[in-house]
Amino acid sequence: MKIKRQKHAKKIISFYKYNFNFREPFQILLDGTFCQAALKNKIQIKEQMPKYLMGEVQLCTTNCVLKELESLGKELYGAKIILQRFQIRNCAHFKNPVSAAECLQSMLETTNPHHYFIASQDQDLTTAVKKIPGVPLLYIILNTIVLDKPSPRSVSHVQAVQAGELVTPEQQQSICKLKQEQGIVRDGAERRGKKRKKKSGNPNPLSCLKKKKKPAGHPPKKTDGEKRKRSRHKRRKTGGGEGPPLQPPESKSAGE
C-alpha cells in the first residue's frame, strides 16, 4: 500500500474525527456492489480495510442488502457469501424489504448519528449520500480501496458550524440534556400538551354592565375665608349651651 494513499486517508479521517466526532471502531456499511468489486479484484476486505483506515473497523450490512442479492441470482452469489460473514444491522424494513440503496440511505437518516461509513460502487447511492453531511464514502478503483474526499455538503456544514450559524448534533444533544435536567423541556411539553379549549357559553355578565361616568374634573378647592365663615356658623348653631345664661327682661312696675 502506497504511503501517499495512507496520508490522503489519514487527512480525511482526521477531518471526520474532528468535525463529526467519528471514533474507532469505524462502522462501515457495505452493499453487494462493493463486495462484488472486491471479489473481482481479489481484495480481502476484512484484512485490507483496517490497514487502509489505520484503525479498528466493524464491517456490517442490512437484511435488505442480503435479500436484494438473493433476488439477483447466482451471478452475485459470491458477494452474498462475503456479506453474510459481516454483522447485520437492524433496519426499519424487516417486514417489507426495500432496495439496498434505499435501505442504506435510511440508515444514515439526516445527520448520520451513528457515524457510518458507506462502501458502495452504486453511483445513485453515492450521489444521494453526498447530500448528507458527515458521511465518508469508500469505493474500489484500480484494484485498491479509496476513501473519497469530503463532499461539498460536509465542508459547507463545517464552515457554518465554525461561523456559529449551526449547532452540531453533539451540541444539540448536550443542550437537550441540560434542558431536561433543568425541567425546561418537560414543562414546555406539558404546556404544549395542555392546550386550553375555548368554552362556548353566555357572555360574562360583568362585561354587559354600563360603564360609570367619571367626573369631568375635581371640585374647586375652598378658600380659607369660606372655611372660616362655615366654622363660625356652626359655632353659633351648636354654641347655645355655652356662655352665661340669658336674663329674663325686667317687668315694668305698675306706676311707670
Image: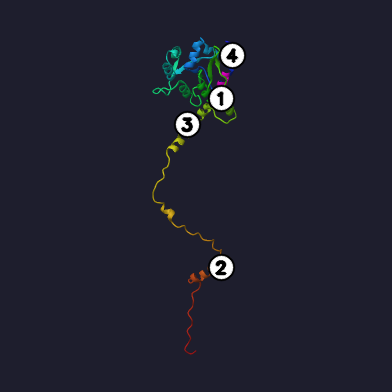
Q: Main secondary structure of the magenta part?
A: helix
Task: Say above or below: 178 vs 9.
Answer: below
Task: Say above or below: 158 vs 213.
Answer: above
Amino acid type, residue under disc 4 in the picture: Arg
Amino acid type, residue under disc 3 in the picture: Gln
The front one of 56 and 72 is: 72
Give the number of the disc on residue 180.
3
The front one of 157 and 105 is: 105
Q: Nearer the viewer, mark 4 or mark 2?
A: 4
Tell me if residue 184 is in the magenta stretch: no
User: Outermost residue toward the bottom?
Assistant: 255
Label 1 sits on residue: 154
* Residue 132 image position (x, y, % from top left): 52, 25
State yes or no: discs 2 and 3 in contact (Cβ < 8 Å): no
Amino acid type, residue under disc 1 in the picture: Ser
Q: Specify the segment rendered in magenta.
A: 12-16
Quadrant location of residue 161?
A: top right
Mark 2 burial class by Cα count in 10 Å: few <14, some 14-19, many 20+? few
Q: Secondary structure at mark 2?
A: helix
Quadrant location of residue 160?
A: top right
State yes or no: discs 1 and 3 in contact (Cβ < 8 Å): no
In the picture provided, is 75 more to the left or to the right than 153?
A: left
Which label's residue is closer to the chain start, 3 or 4?
Answer: 4
The front one of 4 and 79 is: 79
* Residue 244 image position (x, y, % from top left): 50, 73
Label 4 sits on residue: 5
State yes or no: discs 4 and 1 in contact (Cβ < 8 Å): no
Give the number of the disc on residue 226.
2
Amino acid type, residue under disc 2 in the picture: Glu
Q: Secondary structure at mark 1?
A: helix
Tell me if residue 14 is in the magenta stretch: yes
Question: In the rendered image, which quarter contains the N terminus?
Answer: top right
